[in-house]
Image (cartoon, helix red, strand yellow):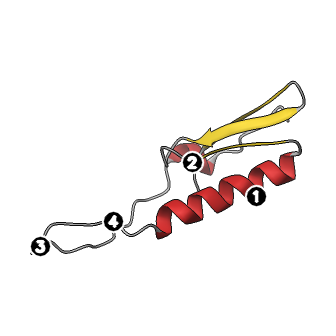
Amino acid sequence: MKYRAMIKQIDGWWIGWLLDLPGVNAQEKTRDEFITSLEIGAQDMLETNVPFEPEAKMTTIEIPDPQWSKRAIVSPY
């Protein structure tokens, strides 16, 4: 799975969040640690048990990759 992330470096810290998974954010000293923290946060979010209504069924749906993901995105970092 691919998710969009907003990332920036401020005062020696990498900070950012996933646009597609609200609540997943991170702050680390190195970019590699930061990316790892975002990955762990996303995995935790996706593995969280979600209560649902009786008689309801949980399912998944496939969403095609958006056009922006098919273009090369150049990061300033």
Q: Amino acid at mark 2?
A: Val
Q: Amino acid at mark 3?
A: Pro
Tell which of 18 and 40 is nearer to you.
40
User: Could you say which quadrant of the image residue 44 lies in?
Assistant: bottom right
Residue under the point 22% across and 66% down? 52
Q: Amino acid at mark 4?
A: Val
Tell which of 37 and 21 is nearer to you.
37
**Front tag of 1 and 4:** 4
Between marks 3 and 4, how big is the CA–CA gap? 12 Å
Give the percent coordinates (x, y) of residue 21: 49, 49
Q: Which residue is mark 3?
A: 54
Between marks 1 and 3, how big is the CA–CA gap? 36 Å
Q: Mark 1 vs mark 3: which is more N-terminal? A: 1
Between marks 3 and 2, how big is the CA–CA gap? 28 Å
Query: Which numbered circle lies on residue 50?
Result: 4
Pointer 3 local density, CA inside 10 Å: few below 14, some 14–19, many at least 20: few
Evaluate if marks 2 and 1 touch, with contact meaning CB atoms under 8 Å apart. no
Give the percent coordinates (x, y) of residue 63: 40, 60
